[in-house]
Amino acid sequence: MLFVPLVMLVMLMVLGVSIILSKKVKLNREKSSPFECGFDSNSNFRLPFSLRFFLITIIFLIFDVEIVMLLPAIYSLPKSILIYWSSVFFLFLLILLLGLFHEWKQGALNWAF
């Protein structure tokens, strides 16, 4: 019952100590303005975005998620039936490789424009 007020009190004490001990800094216009890659991010014009880069990023995310889905299956290998696990693993890798070959054949993996 006293847990929540005690946590709030400790939180306020830590916040107060951090405010008291923090270094006071004067705000500088250049240091407080956003700066990214040598350009002002508040500009009104739009820079062209490479569609090739976007496509490679999407392909990477798809294959990365598939590999993340594969990792728990490796940990469950000792607890499962070997023939069932190997057939599911083979089918999963076959679908993954077919997708990779399809992207390669479509020319999505070429960096040349």
Image (cartoon, rainbow, N blue to C red):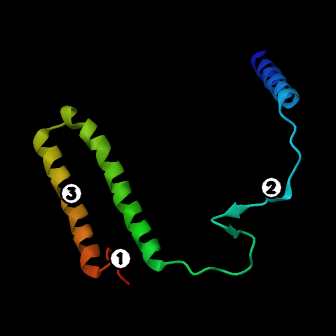
- Secondary element under disc 1, as helix, strand or loop, is loop
The quadrant in which the C terminus is found is: bottom left
Residue carrying label 2: 32
Instruction: Give residue 111's quadrant in the image.
Output: bottom left
**Point 30% across, 44% down: residue:** 71
Mark 2 or mark 3, which has the lower sequence index? 2
Residue carrying label 1: 111
Q: In front here: 87 or 59?
A: 59
Q: Residue 78 bears which disc, if any?
A: none
Q: Residue 93 bears which disc, if any?
A: 3
Q: Please report contact status of discs 3 and 1: CB closer than 8 Å, yes or no.
A: no
Q: CA distance from mark 1 to mark 2?
A: 38 Å
Residue 78 shows in this picture:
yes
Q: Nearer the viewer, mark 2 or mark 3?
A: 2
Instruction: Residue at the far bottom: name it.
Output: 113
Q: Is residue 111 left or right of residue 1?
A: left
Q: Is residue 97 left or right of residue 1?
A: left
